[in-house]
Amino acid sequence: MDQPKNYAVLTNNTSKTKNLVHSLLSGPLPQRFEALENKVGLLFSRSEIHRFMNEEERHDVKIITQDTQQSLKTMSSGEQKKALLRHLLSQSPDFLVLVNPFDNLDVATQANLKEQLLTISKTTVLVQVVSRLEDILPITSNYFKLENGSLKSYPDSDSFFKANQTTTLGFQLPIPPPIQDIDVESDALVVFKNVSVSFDGRQVLNNISWTIKQGEFWQLIGPNGSGKTTLLSMVTGDSHKGYGKDLTLFGQKKGSGESVWDLKSKIGYFTPAMTDKFNGYHSVENMLVSGFHDSVGLYIRPSDHEKRVAKEWLKLLELEHKKDIQFLELTQGQKRLVMTARAMVKHPPLLILDEPTAGLDDANAALFIALVNKISNESNTTIVFVSHRKEVGLEPQFDYILEMGESGSKGTVK
Ligand SMILES: Nc1ncnc2c1ncn2[C@@H]1O[C@H](COP(=O)(O)OP(=O)(O)OP(=O)(O)O)[C@@H](O)[C@H]1O
């Protein structure tokens, strides 16, 4: 049997990917995809994982996690993707539409999935819809780019790759200073001492000792399921697992009566899920100002001073002309820049960025990295940047690496 054709569509922030995915799966098919006519296609994407997550939760049923006790929600990204792929393949589709399949996956899990997809491609057509050139599989035969909703096709891989290499410029203006400094009692902002965490009797973190000091720039790296989110949620106060552990935050022992709000006031936080699910109506300026009030979206009147600082940030991001439009109207890359500026406006002692470049195209990822490097160079804020990808161009001082073992992950500093 001939190997089926495999397609790759490179997307960027203007692409209108949803429309393309819809017409691939439900018609009318775009030109040059006629081979998929009357074929059954299924979707492999983060949005599908979220859809199943909602369904499993709302109806208290197990759809794609039937072979395990654990809920889809509490699984790591790698575990979730594995479960979805297994579920899709059990239905023997003619083709799979894969939207950024390698996002949120560590190197080993990516390699594993890549191998699996190469095998699947021998019998099932793959339509890869990806925002990173490096994610495109070598079995691709038909190349496209989706821009402003229209598809451009390329005669061969050479012309495709040549036409789509990107170069990015950085930001020119300096980081605006804070309105007032936030005092912290100790130079050591976060101190984990021999902290172990288990879920349902299974140890996930094993004797973690990690000290994060003022002004440092860390990258937290670890495979899917190694406990990165678990570790950070003890810092942000989103997990009760920190109680009863030897954990000191901003000079105060965890569980010594600190309020979650007090904690949140010292932390700037951004993860793409914050904007993926956000659908409130707020102007870009108000979204930025809301960082002064530890809310996502502004529910009070901004002061003149706050507006002035917001304006300076928007100037730096070269988005000043967008200040009065709805935040929802921004492109994905612009939203991430604004949300990072939002997290940073008050110059919090600690800025946590959890997989902030997932889903961005190469050019926007590079721009985002340039902003983070700039924040690190021009402020006294400590940065913890979580990512599976060794981000090209990111300049952390230290890596904290989680390595999984039989009795949970151990951490090392590099
Ligand atoms: N509430 C929970 N109940 C049961 N197991 C959990 C819970 N939260 C996390 N886990 C498990 O703990 C392990 C670590 O999960 P965590 O989400 O912290 O990993 P991660 O390194 O952030 O993964 P990823 O990079 O894929 O997001 C996983 O095996 C996960 O299934």
Image (tube, rainbow, N blue to C red):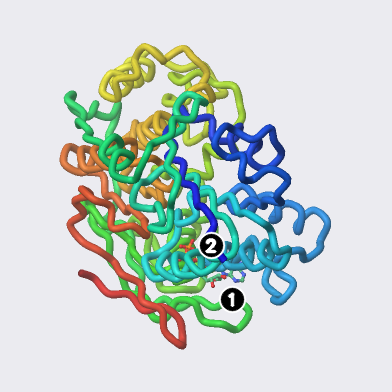
Q: Does residue 90 lie above or below 139 as drawn?
A: below
- Please tell me which residue is depicted at 21% across the width and 61% down the height of the picture: 398
Q: Is mark 1 within 8 Å of ligand 1?
A: yes
- Give residue 168's position: percent from left, percent from top: 22, 33
Q: Quadrant of residue 31?
A: top right
How far across and down, in percent of the image, does residue 396 sit? 21, 54
Give me the residue at 42% from left, 48% from top. Answer: 358
Q: CA distance from mark 2 to mark 1?
A: 47 Å
Q: Mark 2 or mark 1: which is in front?
A: 2
Taking the image as shown, residue 309 lies to the left or right of residue 239, namely left
How many residues crowd mark 2 within 10 Å: few (<14), some (14–19), many (20+)? Answer: few
Badge 1 crowding class, 10 Å Cα cut-off, few under 14, some 14 to 19, many 20 or more, is few
**Quick check: 303 left or right of 297?**
left
Report whether 175 appears left or right of 258.
left
Q: Which residue appears at 75% of the width and 57% of the height? A: 57
| Three-letter code for the amino acid on which mark 2 is drawn | Asp
- The answer to whether residue 386 is left or right of residue 243 is left
Location of mark 1 (residue): 199
Q: Nearer the viewer, residue 63 or 242?
A: 63
SS at circle 1: strand
